Image (spheres, coloured by chain):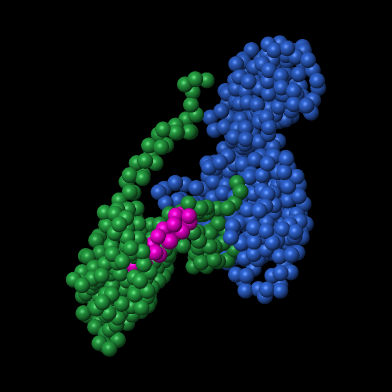
Chain colours: A blue, B green
Amino acid sequence: MVSVKLVNVTKVFRGGVVGVKDINLVIEHGEFMALLGPSGSGKSTTLYLIAGIYKPTRGRIFFGDKDVTKLPPRERNVGLVFQNWALYPHMKVFDNIAFPLRLRKIPESEIRKRVVSVARMLRIDGLLDRYPWQLSGGQQQRVAMARALAKEPDVLLLDEPMSNLDAVLRISVRAELKRLQRELGITTIYVTHDQAEALAMADRIALINEGSIVQIGTPSEVYGKPRTVFVGGFLGNPPMNFLEATVGYVEDKPILVIGNNKLRVPDHYEELVRKLGLNQVIVGIRPEDMGIMDKPVPYRTIRAQVYAVEPMGRETIVVAEVDGSQVKIVTSKSIVLREDQDIHLYPSFEKIVLFDPKTEKALEVLYEEEKLE
Amino acid sequence: MPGMRDVEVRSRASEALILLVILAVSLPLITGYSLLILSGFSKSMVTNLDPSSFYPTLMNWILLLQGRTAQFAGIRVNIWGIVANTLVVALGVSALVTLVGSLTGYAVSRMNFAGRKHIMMLLILLHAFPGSVLVVGVAFIYRMFMPPLEYIRFYSFFYVIVARAAIEIPMATWLMKGFFDMIPWEIEWSAIVDGASRFRVWWNVLLPMIKPGVAAVMLFGFLAGWMDLIYVRTFLVDRTLATFIEANAEAEYAYLPLVAVAGTLYLLPTIIFFIAAQRLIFTISVSGIKG
């Protein structure tokens, strides 16, 4: 098992389409890394570059200390599971799992042992005599996993392996896969567009958008401290709320003006707002970081009208309008609200993230970058 | 509701009309084939759909299998030798067409190389050439590498097979390309990541997935070889069924019911294989994986 390192990796396809540009990424030994992004963002391209299916136009890829940039896929010892699982339809389950082992000229008795043990681990040892088309989706997924694991790969690459499963099955497989990865301690890279999967399973998440990595961090880091508007809007269900605000000053203290509301600037941002001298900011607040009150509190609440109430069972999502734009509030309380009723939103100030409207970057990120220049 | 009709279902009247048109178009062919087959079982040719000209007998088949071309002249021909020759040509063409067609089809479908588009266009162009054009070229090669005369009988098979296959390969390549195109890339990538070479991917993973396609190409190759007249007549020292029938049909003393029997024998694999090929082509399914 090894670490994987991508250094300035760029892939330009024939015809000039840029797949990924300047990817720098380190996946530690035994780590579970999720590559998360919308479709067409370049996350699968990154995975295929690591697998060796694509060759990078520029940059280098390392497995441990070994430069594998020019190595063909079969010399990289990676296990790969595709979204459609790509089982060989004319081979029985046993032969599917044994296929990579047979190519390595491993003795047949050893192959038998390995296939049976990996099949037992994934609980498909009763299906070895069947053909792929005789299996359910969940079973096919397990066979694909078994085939990838049977050759004892250094790196396990998973390309949306669960998006063809139904919702209920996906959640149960999720926990199982996480557990399996921990037990095997195998370096794993998991491509997904489903933020819930990434948050639930990964040690770290790399968010990719338009071919570039936007943010790398633990699930709580990328969720709590998004570096850009994109990250805040992509993670979370419902995603982060964004409100446009102008910066004003009252008695030399900066305040945020949202429509007719005046809001104090969170303590950790006071310095930054002053230093950057911005006139406009975007206020990012997570739906669960806002309370609902009947009465306004000066500089602490935002006035809003109830647009709709969505009871979800465990929680209630309140959709409200603030100065013409919609915000969502997740509340556990079973409060009774009428449509068009006036309410006052009380955000948790320590959890607010402020963004620069021009670059769409969080103020702290912007400040760091300016300091570097 | 009155006036409402399911758009998917044609009315009975239009269905009957379509059937009628198909029948009318194929009537001359059906008539021709049935008269030919009937004549083989008759003492004289059955013509003009006249039942009084049909005198049932098995004599023609017995004569054919004894190798006699004419009932009274009694010239003996080794009919089994002729069938064997035909088989050699047909199987040879079939094997060569399938091998070259499936390899080229894979390359054109899956590999990126300079001139790939031009090769594809050239293939269509080649298919448009009539067989007679190649006769000159083959004759030229024949002259250049003249085999020793005592073996020329055997060498001549080689020329016929290669020439006929050359005509069939463009179409076979396109057919195979179509089949390879249907296989998802992930299957191939999977096999490559698993450690297979491109050749192994082709042989162990892709070909078994498109068995019906391979079979179809084999059949078309076989039929092409079986039915070939132009190269067999020009280059082959021995006769095949096609040239045997041709020679008999031309002969002045020809006993036509016997030719009809030979013709029936000649048609047999064509009919069998077209029925088989039809089945194959309609039951082709590539992935076999549930979505």
Choose top left, top right, bottom left or bottom right for residue B77. bottom left
Q: Position of residue A73 (x, y in %)?
A: 56, 62
Image quarter in which the C terminus of chain A is found: top right
Residue B11 visible in the shown view: yes
Residue at 69 percent of width and 37 percent of height? A223
Residue at 35 percent of width and 57 percent of height? B34
Choose top left, top right, bottom left or bottom right for residue B168. bottom left
Residue at the far right in the pictured view = A333
Q: Foreground residue, A237 or B113?
A: B113
The answer to whether A164 appears left or right of A334 in the picture is left
Q: Position of residue B228 (x, y in %)?
A: 30, 67
Say how many tags the image has. 0
The answer to whether B148 appears left or right of A301 in the picture is left
Q: Foreground residue, B15 or A288?
A: B15
Q: Is residue B277 magenta?
A: yes
Q: Position of residue B233 (x, y in %)?
A: 25, 72
Residue at 77 percent of width and 12 percent of height? A294
Image quarter in which the N terminus of chain A is found: bottom right
In the depicted structure, whether residue A130 falls above or below residue B242: above
In the depicted structure, whether residue A336 falls above or below residue A90: above
Which contiguous range is marked in magenta? B261-281
Q: Foreground residue, B70 or A44?
A: B70
Q: Position of residue A187 (x, y in %)?
A: 68, 57
Q: Is residue A18 magenta?
A: no
